[in-house]
Amino acid sequence: MEKNKSEAIEKALNEYIRQIASDLDLTPQEIIEALKDALVSAIRKELDIPKEAVGSAIKIEENGSSLKFLVNKDFVKTIPEDEAVSDWIEFPLSNLSRVSIQTAENTLKNRMNEKSKEKAIKRIAQFSGEVVTARVIRRDPKTKLIYMDVDGVECVLEPSEQLPTDRYAPGDSLRCLVLGAKNIPMYGQGVALSRSSPDLLKLLFTLEVPEVADGVVRIMGIARKPGRRSKVAVMSIDPRLDPQGACIGYKGQRIQAISRSLANEKIDVVRWDTDPAKLIANVLSPGKVDKVEVLDPKNKRALVYTTPDNIKVVVGEDGENVELAEQLTGWTIDVREGGPDED
């Protein structure tokens, strides 16, 4: 009778393994490993075995998909007569109480979720460094994390990777950069995304501008104040091709598409130059510069002269234009009204 009951349990478990493996996209072996953990937890609870003693108290014998659980006789209160001489006593699964079975079910469920999550994370993390379209699930008001869905997998936008201009309304679709799998504070292991990375902007140019994708137009530098404004310095290896025009597109269509993907972030496309003075003048666009004086090439310091009516545009709101120019060029830039001959 006991043997028939154990065989019935084993048959049911095998069917359960096949079904769960199919539903969760896991291998039968992954299910079996989780099942072993779950049943060991149940047997430990049934026999009141201390957690720290499990390793020496319970062992498992496997024969294909068949599992036999053996318990050290020191932890068994009643030993069958035919097994009295053995140090290890077989524990039939039919001996599990309802409470212990519930323990096994809960442990198995947790292990399944962990395994399924691990597999899903690996699947999306393989796109690290690429752009994906993610759908907003929800915002956690406590942690400020944004939960995003990428192909059915929950991913996370940390506060530092968000755009202040995004609404993040549930259901919104946003283009994001996959940063990869990592341990995310106040979340745990997961796939991190970014909306604020300069690399996202660079990849959007690659996706929207064929000449960038082909390598004819090269992005030489990017400076970004996420959600507000960016500067992108470009050059062309074909002297007949205008790199700025290629990036902006007919009637601004290409640059507008990129800007829309970033919550209408303003993007200045400027021409790259190996001459620091010319580059600084270009990067300060749309401000008009009269002269750039290189003060200290070694420490990269330059002085820019402009007219009183242009200085606000050159400096930008709250110094934003100069800040981005410094970020892109790596130079410290001072701006002055008038010309080099004026006090």
Image (cartoon, helix red, strand yellow):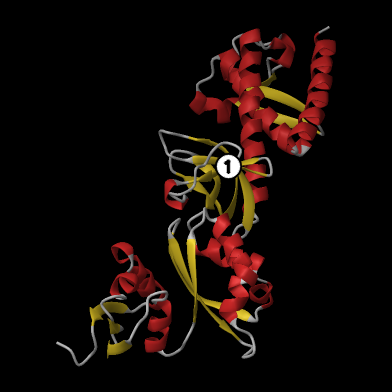
Q: Quadrant of the C terminus?
A: bottom left
- Compared with residue 288, is residue 143 higher up or lower down, i.e. above or below? above
143 relative to 78 in the view: left or right:
left
- Compared with residue 243, is residue 159 higher up or lower down, i.e. above or below? above
The residue positioned 64% from the left and 41% from the top of the image is 153
297 relative to 187 in the view: left or right:
left
The residue at which mark 1 appears reads as: 148
The residue positioned 41% from the left and 87% from the top of the image is 278
Amino acid type, mark 1? Met
Q: Where does the image place residue 322, in percent across and percent down from the top left?
A: 33, 72
Residue situated furthest bottom in the rendering? 341
Residue situated furthest top in the rendering? 1
The residue positioned 40% from the left and 33% from the top of the image is 142
SS at circle 1:
strand
Q: Where does the image place residue 77, in percent across and percent down from the top left?
A: 59, 10
Give whichever of 151, 15 is nearer the camera. Answer: 151
Q: Is residue 213 visible?
A: yes
Residue situated furthest front in the rendering? 309
The residue positioned 57% from the left and 16% from the top of the image is 45
Q: Quick one: label 1, few (<14), some, or many (20+) residues within 10 Å?
A: many
Answer with the quarter of the image where residue 92 lies.
top right
Q: Where does the image place residue 286, in percent across and percent down from the top left?
A: 42, 74
Answer with the quarter of the image where residue 54 lies.
top right
Residue situated furthest left in the rendering? 343
Count of numbered marks: 1
203 relative to 157 in the view: left or right:
right
- Compared with residue 172, is residue 328 higher up or lower down, i.e. above or below? below
Q: Quadrant of the N terminus?
A: top right
Answer with the quarter of the image where residue 317 lies.
bottom left
Q: Is residue 218 visible?
A: no
Give whichever of 327, 89 is nearer the camera. Answer: 327
